[in-house]
Amino acid sequence: MDATPDLIRQLGGGDGALDGIVVLDLSRVLAGPYAAQILADMGATVVKIENPNDPDVSRGFPPYLTAQDQEGAEGAGAAAAQEFSGYYGQYNRGKLGMTVNLAHEEGTKVLKDLVAKADVLVENFRPGTMEKLGVGYDVLKEVNPKIVYTAISGYGHTGSRSRRPAFDSTAQAAGGLWSMNGYPGMAPVRVGTTIGDLSAALFAVIGTLAAVRHVERGGDGQKVDVAQVDSIIALTETAVVDYTVNGTTAEPAGNEHAWVRPYELFDCADGQVFFAGYTDKLWKVSCELFGTPEAADDPETDTMRKRFDKDVYDRKVKPLVDSWFANRTQAELEKLAGDVVPLTALRTIADVVEDPGTAERDMVVEADYGAMGRLRMFGQPIKLSETPADPARTANRLGEHNDQVLAAVGYSPEEIAALKERRTL
């Protein structure tokens, strides 16, 4: 094994801020793949490593790009359908694809050879899984003391709950967020996106970059331990200090803020709008915009603290705001006030995807999958002026880059063929 790390770096990545960083992505489904996807968008060379006998289950998640392949299908009397998961494509774009069976001793050797040439490893298995396979952090740091080992799990790698299985909703339940979401007097409602996975991914990226920075300054690599439950707790805003300071336990508040008012959805002539006019300045401007300037001087509602009072809000503030919006459409309201105060129409995802403002920020990008068409997916929200991200790329097929990656770390064609024959790849 005499190949240099530069060889594997040359296989992927790009001109982004993380060009030159090699990431091994052993993770599955969402939290880990999303973290690695962000690193790939930013220019890192990311190698997605899957078990050839048990690949990332998200390859089977909808929606699907499909194409009819006529070639070679005539004997069957019908076209053979080709499919590719749009879900997988969005979270694994720009990655190289490898298969390695870590249940084989040869497979663990392959991983160690890759780790020796890498900067970061990302995994989101239940704690203890990598150790059972003989490739836990304590083993891999001996192979490469500079490796940044990013582990995402439900409850983290320490503590009495660390070995418990977990999904996104586990984190929402255990982290308290679920109990806060919904309407007063009704059963709590799960947040409508996989916020436990997504938040853990973002915290994992932050931790990974901090650890890489430490290595670049001459330090050793380290384990980055991110738990979904911890990530959710960190997203509960004032709920923790409300409890520790006042003994108040957060409860569902519907579309209202816990104490900031007005700050919620309001009905209008053709739908709903979000409006936040809670500061004294915003309230005064809003009263003037909507033709009721005298309301800004009402002694019951003339200060922010008075408007925060629930009784005053329900009796005087909300009815006034309702009267402003009731006979105006979303477009009329945005035209009148959207550039002056926080007021925006409640949009569907279809509205968002087709909104010119979304295109202006490159937040829907396309990747070309040939006969299956072009996958439109969300872009990269981090905009770097000098080293822009590159999110408009395709995802890998299973094991697509086995030969190139192994050759880059020094394997001969004969060695690669032997690994394939023994079903290690």
Image (cartoon, helix red, strand yellow):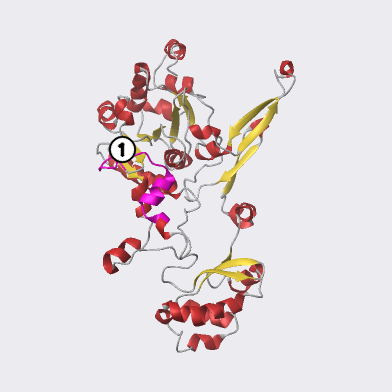
Towards the viewer: 259 or 173: 173
- Which amino acid does the dot numbered 1 rest on? Arg
The span picked out in magenta is: 156-178
Q: Main secondary structure of the magenta part?
A: loop
Q: Residue at x 34, y 19 (%)?
A: 109
Picture layout, residue 362 above or below residue 49 = below
At label 1, counting other C-alpha atoms closer than 10 Å, the crowd grade (few under 14, some 14-19, many 20 or more) is: some
Residue 323 placed where, x, y %?
A: 60, 79
Picture layout, residue 181 above or below residue 231 = below
Residue 382 placed where, x, y %?
A: 47, 50
Towards the viewer: 237 or 243: 243
Pick the quarter of the image with the C terminus: top left
Magenta segment includes 193: no
From where the camera sits, is residue 3 visible?
no
Residue that carries the numbered disc 1 in the rendered image: 163
Q: Residue at x 59, y 62 (%)?
A: 346
From where the camera sits, is residue 285 visible?
yes
Pick the quarter of the image with the N terminus: top left
Q: Residue at x 43, y 14 (%)?
A: 419
Towards the viewer: 118 or 233: 233
Residue 349 placed where, x, y %?
A: 60, 53
Q: Secondary structure at mark 1?
A: loop
* Number of disc labels: 1
Q: Residue at x 28, y 26 (%)?
A: 143
Picture layout, residue 239 above or below residue 419 = below
